Image (tube, helix red, strand yellow):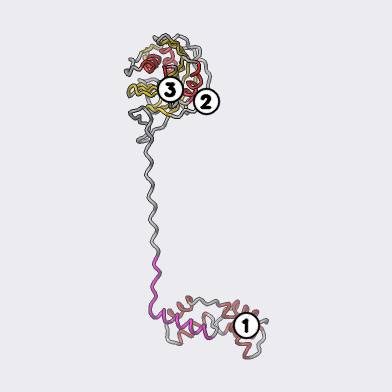
Amino acid sequence: MKKIATMALTAALVLSMTGCISLTAAKEVEKDSDPELANTEGEIPPVVSDLSEKALLGDCSFEYPVTWEITVDSEDQISATASFNKATACLQKDPADGVTSSDLPQVAEGVANGTYGNGDLSNVRNCTIDGIDAIKFDHTATIGGNEYAVTTIALVKDDVLYSLMAGYCDESQKTIVEDILASFRVTVTEAGAGNISDDGMAEPAPEPEPEPEPAPEPKAEEPKTTVSQDNALRTAKDYLSIMAFSHEGLVDQLEYEGFSNEDAVWAADNCGADWMEQAEKSAESYLDLMGFSRSELIDQLVYEGFTQEQAAHGADSVGL
């Protein structure tokens, strides 16, 4: 016969109302038979009231009004209570001791048959909270001469049994209690998150350290030129300021001046000349001296070192 440990859930609710800070011992229930459950599936509905505060315990949390008093009853229980005990909510956790979501009906059975239970299991229904299977059931508890309407939600996460119990004895608190139940959430905690401070309110997770901006990549240094390259470039620009040259013609002229082929080519490549424009100027100069047919002018420009395309462009520029 398998036994599982269940929390004295309604007793914990009583403790939250009376201000007791100790935990009631867990009650064991034998699994003689499964209770009949209403298979009403569905997610917990969204919160509709302005619940401005949050209480966290382990991996679960609930929200409550700022006017309620929050109490950390122990490391395993946290409560929020309205003025004059008109309503209360209590979040509790216990080791699951092998309990799985399929065993949750026994948790309800333990509450229903406990000291403060009413033995009614007809309203137990299944639900999910943030994708985790849970059960939700209603019961009553008579405390201090007042009868409280209580709703309990229970679930298992990471071998821990969590329950949120919320109840009211004043009808004016019914809506806010329903909204507190709707705010029950499973929180994925990170390092430094989900702690409870001395006043029972959740401490905010620390702000992440800003990532350092990547260091700018060092600019590649421009290759240094040699003295002979600098002189070849200056000579090339001087010639281009006087007359038109093709790239090949300029290299030949620089070599004639004594520069090496390597320096002459480098200077022609880096002098910034527009060789199409140089072909135009050269074609105009030839026509100033004598008459040319189109083919003769093109041949002359090719002879001067211009490409066929550049030579044809030069002829076009003078109307041939």
Magenta residue check for 259: no
Three-letter amino acid code at the position of disc 1? Ile
Q: Secondary structure at mark 2?
A: loop
Identify the magenta region: 220-242
- Between 192 and 69, the residue placed more toward the observer is 69
Cα distance in 3D space between marks 3 and 2: 16 Å
- Between 181 and 146, the residue placed more toward the observer is 146
Give residue 155's mark. 3
From the viewer's perspective, tell me whether residue 276 is left or right of residue 254: right
Q: Secondary structure at mark 1?
A: helix
Q: Residue at x 36, y 13 (%)?
A: 28
Three-letter amino acid code at the position of disc 3? Leu
Q: Position of residue 318 (x, y in %)?
A: 65, 82
Residue at the spot of label 1: 298
Q: Position of residue 96 (x, y in %)?
A: 37, 21
Cα distance in 3D space between marks 2 and 1: 87 Å
Circle 1 Cα neighbour tier, 10 Å, few/some/many (<14 / 14–19 / ≥20): many
Q: Residue at x 62, y 82 (%)?
A: 298
Q: Quadrant of residue 312?
A: bottom right
Q: Nearer the viewer, mark 3 or mark 2?
A: 2
Q: Position of residue 279 (x, y in %)?
A: 58, 80
Q: Is residue 45 above or below residue 217?
A: above
Compare marks 3 and 2 and give the one earlier in the sequence: 2
